[in-house]
Image (cartoon, rainbow, N blue to C red):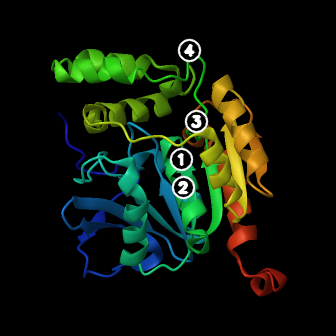
Amino acid sequence: MESITAMDSIGTASLTGDGGGERTAPGNAQSRIHMIRRPGHGELIAEVVGRGRPVILIHGWAVDRRMWAAQLPALKRRFKVITFDRRGFGQSTCPPGLDQELEDLDAVLEHFRIDATAIVGMSQGGRVAMRYASSRPTRVNALVLQGAPLDGFAPPSGDVSIIPAKRLAALLHAGDRGEALRILIEHPLMDPGERFTAARAQILAMLRDYRGEDLLTAPTAELSLDEVCAQLARITTPTVVLTGSKETLWLRRVADFTARHIYGARRRVIRGGHHFVNMTHAADYNRCIVDFLDRTTTPWNERALGIS
C-alpha cells in the first residue's frame, strides 16, 4: 500500500513530539505536525496551522485529515486549526475503535493545552463530535456537524447510504484490495459529483491509503435511538447541522432529525453539494462555518469592539 508521506495542500511541515511545543513559522506559512502518544495504543498524528481560538476538524470514514485542505486557508486567518488522523486512518498508528475516540480527543486537547474548542465533524467524525459535545459540554464551545449519521437511525434496506461493510471486510480478508477499492470508489457517498474532478482525485488518493483496519475488527456497539435522543438533548453548545442539497436523502433526513433534537441548532444546506460538500463547494462551506464560528466563539466584548 502507498504510504502517506506529505500533505500536498499544506506545504512544508515540521515534526514535533509531545514535548516539542509549537514552533510556528513566521506568518504561519508553515503547518506543524505533532505526534500525540496514546500509551498502549500508538500515536495520533495531528497537524496545526494558524493562530487564534482553537478549531478541531474531525474527518470522516475511510479518508483522513487531507479532506480539510480547502478549509485551512479560510480558517487559519482567524483560528488555530487542528486536524488529525483518527485512530485506524491516515498516518495514525493507533488501532481503530470508536469507543476510544472520545479519550483521543481529550488527548488532543491536553497536548495543545486547550480548555475548550470548536469542533467540526464530518460523517463518522460528526458522530464522534456529537458524542464528545454531549459527554463533555464544557470542552466544546461550538459544533458543526456535516453529513453525520446517528446510532439507532439506520437507513432502510437497500438505501444508497449503506456501506457494504461485510462485503468489504470479506474482500480484505481474502486479500482482494483492488475490488474493495473499486466498491468504495463507486459508492454514492464517495461521489463528489461529475464535474468535480479535483475533489474526485483527492478522495481517490485518500481511499487508496485507507487500510480497512476498522472493517477487520469487531464493530462497536451502537446506542438505541432513545439513547441517542437523550445524548442530543444534552448538547448545549451552539450547533450547525449542515449538508449539501445533493447529499443522500437518508442523511438529509438524519440531519433534519439531529437539528430538531439539539436545542437551538441551526440547519444549513449548501446548494449542489454531495457528501463531501466541504471539498466541492469550499467557498460557500467556508463562509458558512467561519461566520458561525466567529459569532459563537468570539467573546461578546470583542464582538462589541469589532475584534475578530
Q: Nearer the viewer, mark 3 or mark 1?
A: 3
Amino acid under label 4?
A: Ser
- In x, y percent, where is residue 40? 18, 63
- According to the picture, the residue beneath numbered tag 1 turns out to be 127
Find numbered disc 2 in the image and state the secondary structure of the residue it sits on.
Answer: helix
Residue 30 visible in the snapshot: no
Q: Mark 3: give few (<14), some (14-19) or many (20+) Cα within 10 Å.
A: some
Task: Check the picture and name the quadrant holding the N terminus.
Answer: top left
Q: Nearer the viewer, mark 3 or mark 4?
A: 3
Depth order, front residue of 169/93: 169
Q: Earlier in the sequence, mark 2 or mark 4?
A: 2
Q: CA distance from mark 2 to mark 1?
A: 6 Å
In which quadrant of the rendered view does residue 246 lie? Answer: top right
Q: Mark 2: give few (<14), some (14-19) or many (20+) Cα within 10 Å.
A: some
Contact, mark 2 vs mark 1 (Cβ under 8 Å): yes
Instruction: Report the disc number at residue 152.
Output: 3
